[in-house]
Image (cartoon, rainbow, N blue to C red):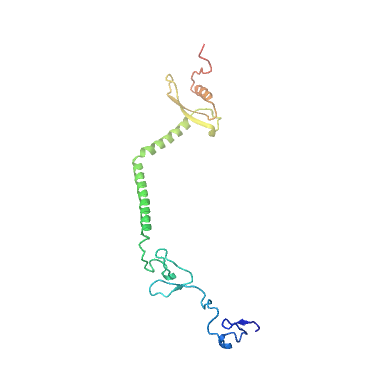
Amino acid sequence: DFLPFVCDGCSGVFCLQHRSRDAHGCSEVNMRNSSVKPDQHKSYPCSYKDCNGKELLPVLCPYCEKHFCLRHRHQSDHECEKLDTPKPRMAATQQLVKHIIGKYNSKKNEEAKSKKRKGAKNSETAAKVALMKLKMHACGDKSLPQTERIYFQVFLPKGNKEKSKPMFFCSKWTVGKVVDFAASLASLKNDNNKSTSQ
């Protein structure tokens, strides 16, 4: 083996066989480079009582700020002196749960009240039924497509035998055309095209 080995005691160059201090009878007892330690890795000992555990990385408790091994890293595991601090979070969680339950109960109460007030829902249903009847009995230009139809309950003048008549018109028509068409459907006299001033 031709690799040179430098002794850190006497700075002599030796072969593989004589590289150790004992093999070449090194006269220097103290190491020249005292900064080199056999264990170069820093370790963090556990602060928990009677624990000899060490970690290569610091495991700090965020509450008491002491180092612990992985086994004692939680507050409950190392009997942290500041174990009472997480309680506000628990209280906030309980308050949130109560708020959600309160919302749920108030929603239930509203549903119970709405069941008592069935009139609103019944009036909605009645309006839908009335619209269906209006569409069934309405008269108008049958050549109009369904998508362009608009339905009205047209109230007629007092002199007529019918009080009102369901009719449909084109949604694109002008008001004048609608009035003329309604007058012709109801057989009414329509003189809106003549001027009244003389």
Residue 91 percent location from the top left of the image: 35, 56
User: For the point 35% across and 44% down, which residue is it?
Assistant: 110
Query: Where in the figure is residue 31, as x and y percent of width and height?
Result: 54, 81
Q: Residue furthest right?
A: 2
Position in image of residue 184 (x %, y %) = 51, 22
Q: Quadrant of residue 52?
A: bottom left
Please identify the residue farthest to the top as the structure is shown.
198
Which residue occupies the foreground of this view, 157 or 106? 106
Q: Nearer the viewer, residue 51 or 122?
A: 51
Number of numbered tags placed on the structure image: 0
Can you say whether 75 is above or below 91 in the image? below
Quadrant for the N terminus in the image: bottom right
Judging depth in this view, the residue of 110 and 67 nearest the camera is: 67
Residue 33, placed above or below residue 116: below
Quarter-wise, where is residue 159 in the image?
top left
Would residue 103 be found to the left or right of residue 190 on screen?
left
The residue located at (48%, 32%) in the rendering is: 135
Is 125 placed above or below 66 here?
above
Q: Quadrant of residue 82?
A: bottom left
Q: Is residue 195 left or right of residue 160?
A: right
Question: Is residue 82 rendered to the left or right of residue 169?
Answer: left
Rendered location of residue 79, percent (x, y): 36, 68
